[in-house]
Image (cartoon, rainbow, N blue to C red):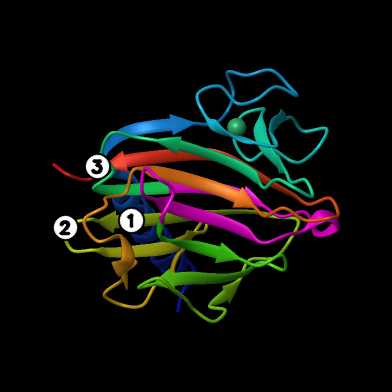
Amino acid sequence: MKAHKRVVLSLLLAFIVGCTIFAVEGEGTLLFSDSFEDNRIGGSPAGWEGAGMSIVDKRRVEIPDGNFAVRLDNKPSENGTIYKIFDNLDRCRLYVSFHQPERFKENLYIDVKTEEGGRIFGLFITGSGNVRIRDGGVQSPNILNLPNNLWHRVMLEWDASTQVWHAYVIGSKSITPITPEGGARFDPAYEGNPPRMILFEIPKREDRKVAYIDQVELYDLSE
Ligand SMILES: [Ca+2]
C-alpha cells in the first residue's frame, strides 16, 4: 500500500473511532457533573455526602481533569465514601474516573443504589484493579484488569424500566464493554425500588487505604 493511502486510511479510522466516542459521550441531557474544582484543598467536596472524603491536588496524585480530585480515606471503623442522591435516576449514564494507588490499594465500589442504600448494581474493583460486575445481585469473576497507579474512566448506563445495565471502560481511543452483550441485570431484591444514588466507596480496614475519584458526569437518557 502506498504511504498516502495508509495516511488516508489511518485518518479515516481515527475519524470513525472519534465519531463512535462522540456518539457515546454525546447522547442524553447532562443532569449533573462535578470535577471538584470549586472546592478548597483538604476540605470536603461541596454538594456530596460521605465520610473520609477530601479534596487533593497534583501534590498528592496526578489530576486527570482540572486541578482537583477527591481522595477517599478509610478508617478501621468507617468506610471512605462519597455519594449523592437524586430525585430520578431511572434512565441514566454515569461517567467517573478513578485511581487506586498501589501503596494503599483497596477494593473500590462504584455503585448505583436505592435511596436507602440498597445496591442495585455496580462495579467491584479489587485492590489490584480486577474489575467485577454485579449481575442480578451476584458478583461476577474478574472480567478485566485496570492497573494500579493510573487513572481509569468507566461508564455505567442503565434503564430501570428494563432492569438492565451496561458498563464500559472508556479509553482514549477505545470503548471496552465490561457487561455481557445485552447487558447485566439489576438486583431483583430491589425491584420496584428505583436507582436514586451514585456512590464510590472503599471499605473500612485496620490499615490505611486510599482511592481517588474525579470527573463525575451524569446524563439523563429519558428523552
Ligand atoms: Ca477535577
- Quick one: label 3, few (<14), some, or many (20+) residues within 10 Å? some
Q: Which residue is mark 2?
A: 161
Q: Amino acid at mark 2?
A: Ser
**What range of the chain is rendered magenta?**
95-118
Evaluate whether residue 178 shows in this view: no
The residue furthest left is 223
Label 3 near label 1: C-beta < 8 Å?
A: no
Q: Position of residue 16 (x, y in %)?
A: 34, 60
Q: Position of residue 78 (x, y in %)?
A: 70, 45
Residue 28: assigned label: 3
**Regarding mark 3 in the picture, which secondary structure is present there?**
loop
Q: Which residue is mark 1?
A: 157
Q: Amino acid at mark 3?
A: Gly
Q: Residue at x 29, y 57 (%)?
A: 158
Which quarter of the image is occupied by the N terminus?
Answer: bottom left
Circle 2 or circle 3, nearest the eye:
2
Whole-number angstrom distance, CA of label 1 to CA of label 3: 11 Å
Q: Position of residue 150 (x, y in %)?
A: 70, 55
Circle 2 or circle 1, nearest the eye:
2
**Regarding mark 1 in the picture, which secondary structure is present there?**
strand
Q: Is residue 192 left or right of residue 130?
A: left
Evaluate whether residue 167 shows in this view: yes
Whether residue 104 appears in magenta in the rendering, the answer is yes
Whether residue 18 appears in magenta in the rendering, the answer is no
Q: Residue at x 45, y 35 (%)?
A: 84
Q: Earlier in the sequence, mark 1 or mark 3?
A: 3
Q: Is residue 8 left or right of residue 202?
A: left
